[in-house]
Image: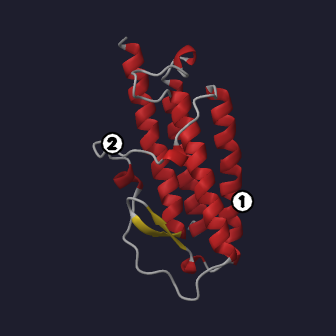
Amino acid sequence: MQSRTEELLASLDSAHETLLSAIACVPAALREQRPAENRWSAAEVVEHLAIVEDRIVELLTQQLANPTDTPAQSIPTLTVEALTDRSLKRVASEASQPSGSLVMEEALDALNGVRVGTGEMIRTARDYPVDRVALPHPALGTLDFRTWIVFIAGHQTRHAAQIREIGEMLAGQ
């Protein structure tokens, strides 16, 4: 039986494989090209993922160091499947917007670097009262530590679908 830590790490690994598979569907020469005026390129999507995950890990790490005195409130179950529903459009916050200055290789390097830190944080969290860690999400409400990790995996899977859409749009041009 897998531990909760192993389950969380496996979920992140699976989402990352899904992302890499989606990126492979976009020809290398088109990965920095926007498919339309108000759409991100595949490289910008990956840069966005690195920005968001880095911010989440930074905030969770701070909370692990300073947990609340009481367990987090009951938080609704969040699944990767719920997060991947692309029929619900979301707009990224200003702080989560990609710069557009990275090529795909640089964006992937940034995401992979953040992911190392995410894994370290999750492994270290075994020694902390994660049931006392919760942070607000602007659209989903307050999420506890484990649910934030599910969010990271779902967010990456959601954007993998977006990258596939970008590839299809570019192929049709």
Residue 162 pos. (x, y %): 41, 34
Instruction: State the quadrant of the N terminus.
Output: bottom right
Residue 66 is tagged as none
Q: Does 9 sit left or right of 42 as displayed? A: right
Report which residue position mark 2 lands on.
86
Instruction: State the quadrant of the C terminus.
Output: top left
Residue 121 pos. (x, y %): 68, 63
> Which of the two discs, 1 and 2, sits closer to the camera?
2
Tell me which amino acid carries mark 2. Arg
Report which residue position mark 1 lands on.
120
Q: Residues within 10 Å of mark 1 (few under 14, many from 20)?
A: few
Residue at the far bottom in the pictured view: 69
Q: Front-most of 159 and 41?
A: 41
Mark 1 and mark 2 residues within 8 Å of each other at the beta carbon:
no
Residue at 59% x, 34% y is 99
Residue at the far left in the pictured view: 87
User: Would you place residue 144 above or below residue 68 in this image?
Assistant: above
User: Would you place residue 110 above or below residue 5 in this image?
Assistant: above
